[in-house]
Amino acid sequence: MSRRNNRILHVDGDSFFASCEIALDSSLEGRPVWVGGGRRGDGIVIAANRIAKKYGIKTGTACFEAKRLCPSGVLCRPHYDAYRELSRQMFLILEQYAPTLVPYSIDEGFLDLTSFDECIWRNTTPTDYVQNIRSRIKKEVRLPVTAGLGNSAKMAKLATDAAKGVGFMEVEAGREKEFLRDRPVQEMSGIGKNRQRSLAALGALTFGHVAKLPSMLMRQKFGIWGQQLWLFSNGQWNEPLVLEIKDRTTISSSTTLPLDEHDYEAALTFMLSEATRLTGQLRREQMQAREFSIAVRFNDFTEVGTSFRFKHPQFLNSVINTVLEQMFREIMGGRERPVRQIRIAMYNLERLDTHPTLWGRTNEERWGALDDATHELNQKLGKTALITGAQLALQHIDESQKQPKAKCPFTPQREMITKLWGSEGPVKSEQGVLF
């Protein structure tokens, strides 16, 4: 009996942030549009639509340079909450078309269409099926998407890249090696500069070159990853799509202040407020952190930082904030330049059991109950219905913090899954190796 070929569909939003702005304002349709980042939304371009890209505008271009390249173009400041909502609507449509949906980022995901040729596609074709998905998203969410179909997530993503400007491409079963032959190896995610150089030293610039190398040579040079790359390049990597919800390994915050801050005490208040927010998020996810790091960038783009490791993982604001305050004062001693940006990272995370009883038998249980109640009240009454003393002090220091701006929505996969299906997700199983 022959082995069934997996059919994995990758769907990717086109220039997502820029497309969201056009979806929010129909008057922008047909015009060059780019979204600006930075503290005032006029720093660098973080997304540009296809029309703007024809003028040479791309991610990382300074907004003033983009305006010089395209005087008739439109600069939009980001509206991250709106982007999240449009993303949610897009994924709600996608989940109607396959038994397994794996969100990959805010604007892309994978669908398992294996065995559809035996039932769903009897009276249609893969192209018609996918075009229907694209049409629904465009009509109902007002977002353009591109899709690729292949025998693995990696193949489907490469097919999507090849379909940019076309809309959809299928790499048919048995033609994978032909499709890959002339494509550069750096097109596949996970192949960094060091691996590119190592492959180039073997004369392997394309997947076709890799396919011609001896399999054992690839294994000797790169281990199991090399063996997998050789199989992939020869069209023999037939990988299933598996949904897995993993625990968070790190949590961090990187925020550029609205104005350069000369008052270090005010900067400290902001840092402690952010630390309180991150710690609360960890407890809601039933996690605790053993290691912490902070970094402060000044207005001349120099920076200082330090890290700390506890003997035991921590989850209490009082413990964490006391240490972070000491760390902040140590690195800021003798400094004079205004603060531009503050970064906090908590890592080496471990599980925390905060499941409460009626009254709570332990500190962990009581804190878990408190965090759950606080989060529920803030969801119902507003994001700042219940705040800490540090957050209240920050509001008095900076009026703009009374209605804090939404964070950039690079939502981790597990959070996207939770929002779509609840805390557990539709499927829990072991993850296959993605290289």
Image (cartoon, helix red, strand yellow):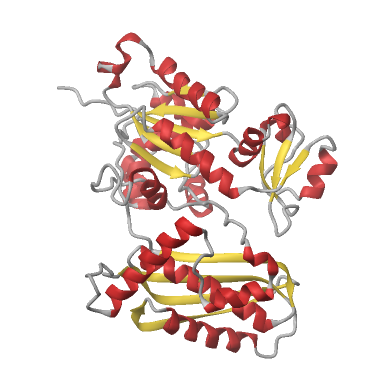
Q: Residue 333's spot in the image, x, y percent?
A: 65, 90
Residue at x 61%, y 62% (from the top left corner): 404
- Of 84 and 340, nearer the camera is 84
Q: Is 144 on the left or on the right of 126, as rendered? A: right
Q: Residue 293's spot in the image, x, y percent?
A: 50, 76
Whether residue 181 is visible here, answered yes or no, is no
Above or below 137: residue 298: below
The residue lying furthest to the front in this view is: 381
State which quadrant residue 92 falls in: top left
State which quadrant residue 334 falls in: bottom right
- Of 56 and 327, nearer the camera is 327
- Quadrant containing the N terminus in the rendered view: top left
Above or below 64: residue 170: above
State which quadrant residue 120 falls in: top left
Q: Residue 376's spot in the image, x, y percent?
A: 40, 60
Q: Residue 259's spot in the image, x, y percent?
A: 74, 68
Residue at x 61%, y 42% (from the top left corner): 17
Residue at x 75%, y 52% (from the top left corner): 42
Whether residue 363 is visible here, answered yes or no, is yes
Q: Is 281 on the left or on the right of 297, as rendered? A: left
- Of 152 and 83, nearer the camera is 83
- Of 368 and 218, nearer the camera is 368
